[in-house]
Structure formats: C-alpha cells, structure tokens
Image (cartoon, rainbow, N blue to C red):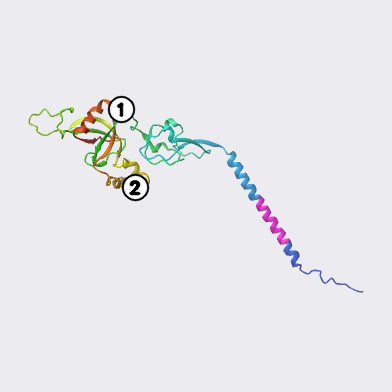
Amino acid sequence: MKISINANKGKFNKTSFLNKRLAGFMVIVFSLTLAGLGTYKLRDYLIDNRPTEQVLVAGRDIMPYSVITSEDIKYIEIPLGSSLSGTAKNPKEVIGKRANTVLYKNEQILLKKLSDSSLIVEEDEGLVGIPVDAIRAVGFKIRPGDVVDIYWINDRQSSDLPTRKSTDASDEVERAQLVAEQAVIIDVLDKRNVSIYKQALLNAPEEAMEEAIREKKSTLSMTAVAVIKIKNKDVENVITAIGNGTSYFCKRAGGS
C-alpha cells in the first residue's frame, strides 16, 4: 500500500499570516477613524444645538473708577448653566455704576465688582478743574468718587472774593474759608492731561495698585489738576477762589 504525504501540509505560511495581520490592522484603523469622525461630528452637533443662555458682559475693557454706560456692555450666548454666581442679569443693574477694578472685554460682570457712582454729573452740578499738589490734595490720598470740602486762603488780597473772615478783631491770621462742601473728585490729571489713576492702574494687578499710584505721583508736576464735581451754586465761589488764592481739599471720613 502506497502512502502519499503532502510535504506542505502543516507548513507555516508567513506571507498569508502577515496579510491577515495587515488586514486586521487596517480594519482597526478604519474603525477608529470612523469612531473619531463620528465623535467629532457628534460634538459639533451638540455644540450647535446645546441649550444656551444670554449673559451680560463687558463690551470692551473698562478701567477702574469708570462709570459704565450702555456702550460698555453687551450680551453674549454661553452654554446653559455656565454663568457665574452673582453676575448682572439686567443692564439696569450695571449702567451708571462705577467699576471697582478692571473689567476685561467679554468678562461676565459680577455685581460685587461694581459700586454706586457719585461721578455722574447731574443737571444742578458742574465740573471745575483746580490746580493741586500733594499738600493741597491730601497727599493724593483722594480717589475718584471721594467727597471733599474745598477751603480757600486769600493770599492775593483781592476784594472781589467771598469773605468769611473771623469776627475776632485780635486775630491777624488770614483764616481759610469754606467755599464748597461735598464736592466729588472725578479725576486728577498730570501735566500731560493723563489721569494718574487710569494710567497707573492700566496694567497693574489689584494688589499692586497702591505702588503703581505712588510711582505715578512721583512724576506729577506742581500744577496737576483735580477735576471736581460741585453744585452749580458753588461754581462762582470756587472759580473766584482758584483765580485769587490757594485752594485745599479736606477729605471727608468715609468719603467715597
């Protein structure tokens, strides 16, 4: 009896094995590619169709002490539930308020970063510029929004000024006279007409504000100008005092 043996039977076929491995690898790559593409498309779909809400944000960078107007704010769409706690919801909560710190463009406006503003000029009020130096301006401890009283010393002996001299005949000292009460500091400008506050704080973090202002003060000329808001009834007295003597500020306690 003749027995035939297939010599190739049971022999390992390397080429066939590699082809099968390559085919399997390609299937895996293709599957992963499809899965990735599907995930990407699903993400886009969810982003485009996710629930959103409108929030009030700064429409541009708002500097500290600035009074916020309707041009400074806008609404944007954000994912539902992404608004921060304490964010302003209505423009009425923001317009006319004063920014306590820098509000950057598209930043949600937190109510804790705002305060009531005394910087808005009402119909019965006017703005006046008073030349000041460190001595006359409380060492530049004044800030926009601070409330001050304005005193005047007649060092030019003009007869056209309001007089509130002492009734004591033995008093030979020219006493300071109160020419305006509850005036509000709007700003202090240096010799280049630049705010010492806005310029100094433009790029300074909150914790560095005091140091930035101190550095800015060192560059002030003796003819820096304090812009103040006063009642219309006091305008004539204040301007007369400016032109005929020296004016001093007295910052009121808790005066901002």
Q: Quadrant of the N terminus?
A: bottom right
Query: Taking 175 as reference, is 231 left or right?
Result: right
Mark 2 highlights which residue? 208
The answer to whether marks 1 and 2 mark residues whose Cβ atoms lie closer than 8 Å is: no
- Please report the residue visible at 28 percent of the width from the left and 26 percent of the height from the top: 232
Q: Position of residue 79 (x, y in %)?
A: 53, 39
The picture quadrant where one finds residue 112 is: top left
The residue stretch that appears in magenta: 20-34
What's under tag 2, amino acid-wise? Ala
- Please report the residue visible at 26 percent of the width from the left and 28 percent of the height from the top: 235
Mark 1 highlights which residue? 125
Residue positioned most to the right: 1
The picture quadrant where one finds residue 256 is: top left
Q: Residues within 10 Å of mark 1 (few under 14, many from 20)?
A: some
Residue positioned most to the left: 170
Q: Which secondary structure type mostly characterizes the magenta part of the structure? A: helix
What's under tag 1, amino acid-wise? Glu
